[in-house]
Amino acid sequence: MLMSFRWYGANDKVTLEMIRQIPVIKGIVGALYDIPAGEVWPLRSLQDLSGTVKSKGFTLSAIESIPVHDNIKLGSGDFDKLTDNYCQSIRNMAKAGISTLCYNFMPVFDWTRSNLAMNLPDGSNCLSYDDAEVLAMDLSKGTRGLPGWSTEYDASDLKRLMDAYTELGSDGLWTNLERFLKKVVPVAQEVDVKMGIHPDDPPWPIFGLPRIICDEAGIDRFLKIVDVKHHGLSLCTGSFGVSPANDIPKMVRKYSAAGRIHFAHIRNVRINGQHSFNETAHPTECGSLDIAEIVKAYVETGFDGVMRPDHGRMIWGETGRPGYGLYDRALGAMYLAGLWEAFKKGSRHA
Ligand code: CS2
Ligand code: MN
């Protein structure tokens, strides 16, 4: 297992020098942030990123994420050209020595929250989600000013996209995912890049848009599309875990034993009601997920992929990118590494 930390590049307030002082971190999860969705990620830029990370003593353990262009998800327009570009980005990743790729297939919106700084009783703050608040958001002016959306759409683009996905529905989205994977996965296999899809976050449809990677049934269907090892999961406990029906330790056991988890995102969440939750500190006692059982499942199935603490709270007065401050993620990494060491010493994989 390679304990890693997400880093947003030269503009990140959390620097590689800071990350280096978290004793357990060996890998950096990075991305290029100046390439428009759909274009090839240049070899040279990937090599530069990898070189920067290496010069501070880390491995560039994963790319999170190469965005999948909406025309791929919609199966429209320049689908073939965009997919060829995606394949070329994967080839370039391999040439730059990067082994793991995280991506997602969520229509229009990536992760969605109603509050990016919900106050907790201990004085820290965290990301939270409540269906009623999300559904009350006014999308008629586009996404500007709404919490968390990295891509800004103006009103007419947003409406056009949302109408197209609504018409497509989840069957159409599955078809396009299948078309995409049948072209991309053979390339990933050939160049030995492990692909892990990130689940939909939250794992239910929002604004009537289809979402398909939400539970075990969805994962089973997904993995069968191309039944090879390089086609797998970025299993995010906090994304799947806000649905009480998802038994995360069981899912980890099943898919890790099958060798299909390449990237483990670990974060805890507190479920407050139907489609309502907030993120919490990592330890089991802080939320609704049994993080110790989850790490145990990884250890006992011999997980050898990339692991990272996922979103943290903002603590000790820190401000910055919601979910991606330094302090709480560092505490999370230490906790996960402690659990890992303890279970490893007690298991036959020691
Ligand atoms: C999030 C996502 O849960 C998470 O890790 O921060 O934005 C995630 O990076 C993407 O959905 C992966 O494609
Ligand atoms: Mn995640």
Image: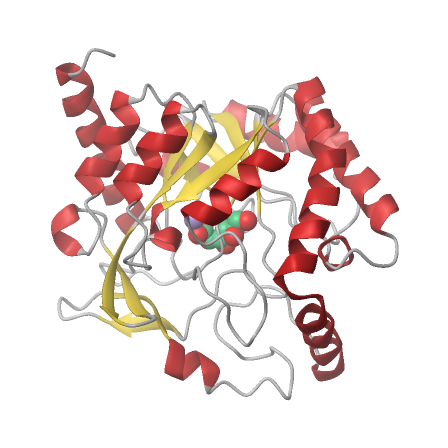
Residue 272: quarter of image: bottom left
Q: Say above or below: 242 vs 51.
A: below
Residue 180 vertical position relative to residue 214 in the rendered view, above or below: above
At which x and y percent is residue 86?
A: 75, 40
Q: Nearer the viewer, residue 204 or 149?
A: 204
- Answer yes or no: is residue 20 visible: no
| Quadrant position of residue 192 | top right
Q: Could one spot residue 117 in this view of the protein?
A: yes
Query: What residue is rendered at 18% in x and 30% in y?
Result: 338
Q: How is the image coloured?
A: secondary structure
Q: How many marks?
A: 0
Residue 114: image location, x then y, percent: 41, 75
x then y, percent, for residue 321: 44, 60
Q: Position of residue 285 (x, y in %)?
A: 11, 51
239 or 212, which lies in front?
212
Q: Quadrant of the N terminus?
A: top left
User: In the picture provided, is 258 more to the left or to the right than 186?
Assistant: left
Question: Is residue 294 rendered to the left or right of residue 136?
Answer: left
In this view, 117 is above or below 193: below
Q: Residue at x 32, y 51 (%)?
A: 246
Instruction: Name the quadrant containing residue 45.
Output: top right
> Quick one: quadrant of the C terminus?
top left
- Above or below for 169 versus 82: below
